Amino acid sequence: MTTFIDLPDLASRLLGGGVVAANDEFFAARDNLVTPEPPTFVAGTFGAKGQVYDGWETRRRREPGHDYAIVRLGAPGTVAGVVVDTSFFVGNYPPYASVEACGLPGYPGPVELLAADWVTLVPRAPLLGDSRNLFEVHDEQRYTHVRLRIYPDGGVARLRVHGVVVPDPMLFPDGQLDLAALEHGGLVVGCSDMFYGAPQQLIAPGLARSMGEGWETARRRDDGNDWVRVRLAAPGQIRQVELDTSHFKGNAPGAAALRGIDARAADPADQAAWFEILPRTRVQPDTRHRFPVDAVPTATEVRLDIFPDGGMARLRLPGRIAPTDLGRLRRRWSESLPAAHARQVGPAGTRPAGAWWP
């Protein structure tokens, strides 16, 4: 059974998330909130301000009030759930927290954000120390920032904001983009094995810095092969396949193949409905491979097969969204905007004349 924690963390530094403001970070830096790796702790490690914590920690309040941190989502989208992780904070965690969100165009700074119209996603709720506190959210609006409030003070190791990416279609007006990219709304929906590395990392931004930032399976001892399925950001025609085995040297696959399907017209369970995009092709270790693709049908989903097993750093699928589907994407984006954001936007993905937009 899948839950909201199976969705991408929109706040992660991996996607470009960052903490743009906090009223206090005396004991531990606010930037730790969006670190993609799990928090760590080494007892007896002291700095000038006390025990070193891998998280955000404020000083003890001696006056009424509470502390807050504002996080820019690396990939704006709809929020399905929030995790307030207090790992290793035992006698110094906040007893309560709340989470709000807002949506603004462009690249607002702290002043504009403090004046924004904030919507409550998680009302003030009790927290447990040294725990991953999970809060499900039911909201269909697209947000660009979240604000974590802690009452009255204390330490939080990580803030995870899981949800569905809703890309701004004006960033690719001609419909050309990486159809698989996580930052555009691509999503891994299934895989055969992820023993050493999570498959979502295949479609993460940027280049992998090590094997640990790719997808890697266990060694197979049978006649089968491993695979991963990716739902594309939007229906489109793939024009190129990039298979990046960087850092995988003694454990790269021997070969790979890619198939596609339009799940709007066919059942993915019907193997005959899948069409070939890249035939089974030999791949080399520690190499970025790029393969041009002749005209293929529109796909909503792809399946990457690796033979027989191994690791892949990245999967890129440059292509183009058909005009009709690009129009649907624009309407989805427009209809998901919070009221304050929508007031500054014209109909279905247009920009008001004279307005500044990135």
Image (spheres, helix red, strand yellow):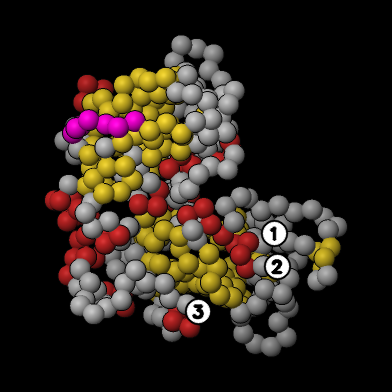
Residue at 59% of width from left, 23% of height from top? 250
Secondary structure of residue under mark 1: loop
As displayed, is residue 162 above or below residue 154? above
Residue at the disc numbered 3: 110
* Cβ atoms at labels 2 and 1 below 8 Å apart: yes
Write down the region rendered in magenta. 291-297
Q: Is residue 294 magenta?
A: yes
Q: Earlier in the sequence, mark 3 or mark 1?
A: 1
Give the distance between the C-alpha atoms of the residues marked 3 and 2, in whole angstroms.
20 Å
Mark 2 closeness class: few <14, some 14–19, many ≥20 residues within 10 Å: many
Q: Residue furthest top?
A: 223
x%, y% of residue 214? 52, 37
| Residue carrying label 2 | 28
Q: Residue at x 45, y 27 (%)?
A: 192
Q: Which residue is located at x 52 percent, y 26 percent?
A: 285
Dot 1 alpha-carbon crowd within 10 angstroms: few under 14, some 14 to 19, many 20 or more: many
Measured as percent of width and height from the top left, residue 95 is found at 64, 70
Kindly state the secondary structure of the residue where label 3 is placed.
Answer: helix
Gap between marks 3 and 1 measured at Cα: 24 Å
Q: Residue 142 occupies which quadrant of the picture?
A: bottom left
* Residue ID at (38%, 66%): 143
Closer to the N terminus: mark 3 or mark 2?
Answer: 2
Residue 129 drawn in magenta? no
Q: Is residue 119 left or right of residue 69?
A: left
Main structural element of the magenta stretch: helix, strand or loop? loop
Looking at the rendered structure, the kind of residue marked 3 is Pro
| Residue where numbered disc 1 is placed | 54
Name which residue type carries label 1.
Asp
